[in-house]
Image (tube, grey):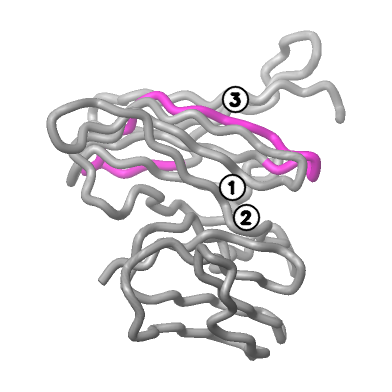
Amino acid sequence: RSDHLYIAYTRNLPNPYEPSVYLMKLDKDANILRDDTVYVNSSWAAYPGDIAIDQKQRLHLVWMTTAPGWEIYYAMLDTAGNFLVDTMKIVCKPPSGGAEYPRIAIDDSNLARVCWDDARGTSWDVYYKWQLWDPEVSGGSNQSQTQFIFPSSASRLELKLSEETKIEIFDVMGRKLIKTTAHPPLFIWSPPIPSGIYFIKLDQRIYPFVLVR
């Protein structure tokens, strides 16, 4: 909104060797307003990622690492570089054979969409994950949020709740399996039903869930 430009990039600094993710901020005349590290881990090599900004002026960053394996990481910051969602791994199940070159975009609901190259099995394919809901940040920009979820295959559903929430779960035929009102801090659903795709309705929004037995 202030005509600023944000650039996320990676750089490996020698002496000591520190693979890092950097955030550069420029004004509309290309003057550098900041250029410093937002992520450092000397045991993980960081490689080029991607950045997007949502309508609430929050920066969404993704990048890849090479240790302990090739994985994709995510963080959300404000435009001053303060963490709103701490660094988290978003490549989970099935096991990755090598996740590379992530790209991120933000939809009209301020939810993150991420895709990347991944070697699983005998070939390289494009994989995709999406954010289930917007982690509303309150109480200051330095508070990390724990409700940010990229859905993965799992043997049970766990939802971290900040308020009373109406929950309904359906199978792919539209049959309602459960209807309840859940209370903070945690809702766990571990039903004796087959593996498959199910749909979770939280208040008025619906999200897919992959159950694996």
Residue drawn at 67 percent across, 18 percent down = 32
Which secondary structure lies at badge 2? strand
**Where's residue 22, x and y in %?**
49, 30
**Where's residue 167, x and y in %?**
64, 80
**Where's residue 28, x and y in %?**
80, 13
> Spatial distance from mark 2 to mark 1, Cα to Cα?
5 Å
Whichever of labels 2 and 3 marks the residue nearer the N terminus, that label is 3
Residue 37 appears anywhere in the view: yes
Mark 2 and mark 1 residues within 8 Å of each other at the beta carbon: yes
Q: Quadrant of residue 80?
A: top right
Residue carrying label 3: 24
Which secondary structure lies at badge 3? strand
The residues colored magenta run 39-58
Whichever of labels 2 and 1 marks the residue nearer the N terminus, that label is 1
Task: Give the residue type that dot 1 points to.
Answer: Met
**Foreground of the two, 205 or 24:** 205
Task: Give the residue type that dot 3 points to.
Answer: Met
Task: Give the residue type that dot 2 points to.
Answer: Leu
39 is higher (above) or lower (below) than 102: below
Residue drawn at 59 percent across, 68 percent down = 174
Residue carrying label 1: 76
Label 2: how many Cα within 10 Å (few below 14, some 14–19, many 20+) = many
Numbered circle sitting on residue 84: 2
Q: Quadrant of residue 184?
A: bottom right
